[in-house]
Image (cartoon, helix red, strand yellow):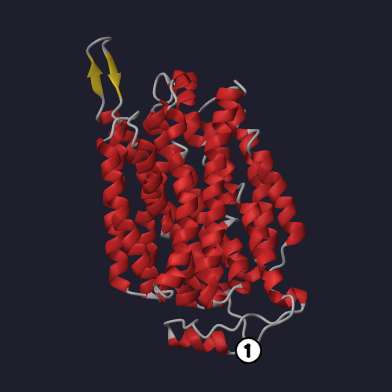
Amino acid sequence: MLQPGYNIAKWRMLIATMFCYLFYYTGRQTFGFAIPFIEEELGMSKTTLGYMGTALLWSYAIGQAINGNLADKFGGRVMMSLGAILSCGFNWIVSFGSNFFSLFLPWIGNGFVQSMGMAPGSKVLSNWWGHKERGIAFGFFLLAAGMSSILAYITPLIVLKEMDLGWRWIFRLPVLLLLVGGVAYYLIARDKPEDLGFSPPEDPGDEPSNESANAMEKEEGVEETSLQRYIHVIKNWRFIAASLSIGFQSSARYGLLIWVPVHFLGKNWQQSNSAWISIALPVGMALGAVTGGWVSDKIFNSVRWKLISSFMIIAAVVTMIMYFLPKDHWAGITVLFLSGFFVYGSQSAYWALCPDLLGRKRTGTGVGIMDFFAYLFAGLVCPFIGRMIETHSVLDTSNGMMINNTAVIFPIVAVACVISAALMMAIKR
């Protein structure tokens, strides 16, 4: 039944959530641009800095498993706002680091508070948007995430190239936007329709596969404990398979996001325009996210696995093409755009799967656990790629220096994409 003002309200919640998340990645995805300068100034190896990436991603993963459940318990509005504000603070602490531990420890804290964005935001959206529209809603949400990646790529280049500031300012200036987003979200957003006098959307498509979970979902007035939510999530084998799939998808995504800037910066990045080619990656991710959500709902009729498997197979093909292209090849910007488009374009379907498989009341827990797998796997791939780059270095006979073969990023990403697609084919949901 159409409620006067409801459509305006649900779009307001979506736009508010998008606005806040638009700045979230300025708090964690700028790290790749600082790697060459930290390596030079503080004498750290790429493998060591890869482990710093792992530290953030794993603390983020643990935080997702905790904060997703807390979002189901306390609501997403306060948590998402608080995470943004705290992340700004941790980035400033990192900017004053002078050795491994003074960078490593606050970066772990930053990973944890960054996890207060995705699951709480997803909880708010699942409360306001019904089953048949969630793919589109999450697509727009991830459009904001993709645009956030663009900001996380552009702002460091502005800091380094246009403002001619040092790497420490990468962790100081961009995150001021995140602070603004967190405060604005708290003032604008509301956790659920009932907070504004509306009834929640009817969800005939929400059918948790576990029968006892389904009964609990329908029984009015029954409030599950945190332990019960965790148990229902873990017992759902389709959900676990999807979580493993997003683990490999996220490995591909972060393999690109962390190491593509390193690939394109090179030794003479200040005299080369190839650094700007890297921006094609987050642009492709942003457009892929919103397109994937629309395709999931409208073309595949909310059957999520078809969208995910199709996009990941195509992503594997285009990233292998990227492997064979020289850095300054004219086609590089297009192929890198397509790599981002298809790798990230599948992600909105993953988040829409959480309420589809588990029911709306467990969305925060489901998104948290799924994102735990995503960042657990992504954390594994970061030092692995760093190590592979170092072990595949070649000698430049003209000057006797070793040159890193950063192109090894792309076949590693392609393999992860294929495994992700195969896992989703198994669950057919």
User: Label 1 belongs to which residue?
Assistant: 220
Q: Is residue 202 left or right of residue 62?
A: right
Q: Quadrant of residue 332?
A: top left
20, 52: nearer the viewer: 20
Q: Quadrant of residue 203?
A: bottom right
Q: Is residue 224 left or right of residue 315?
A: right
User: Pointer 1: residues within 10 angstroms few (<14), some, or many (20+)?
Assistant: few
Quadrant, the C terminus = bottom left
Please determine whether, in this image, residue 237 is positioned above or below residue 258. Answer: below
Residue 282 seen: yes
Give the x, y percent position of residue 393.
26, 26
Residue furthest out toward the front: 330
Name the residue type under label 1.
Glu
Please determine whether, in this image, residue 269 is positioned above or below residue 60. Answer: above
Q: Residue at x 62, y 46 (%)?
A: 23
193, 246: nearer the viewer: 193
Please determine whether, in this image, residue 244 is positioned above or below residue 322. Answer: below
Number of numbered labels in the structure image = 1
Q: Residue at x 35, y 42 (%)?
A: 335
Give the x, y percent position of residue 358.
48, 76
Q: Is residue 78 left or right of residue 394?
A: right
Give the x, y percent position of residue 287.
48, 53
Give the x, y percent position of residue 280.
44, 40
Quadrant, the N terminus = bottom right
Q: Residue at x 52, y 67 (%)?
A: 136
Q: Secondary structure at mark 1?
A: loop
92, 404: nearer the viewer: 404
Residue 28 seen: no
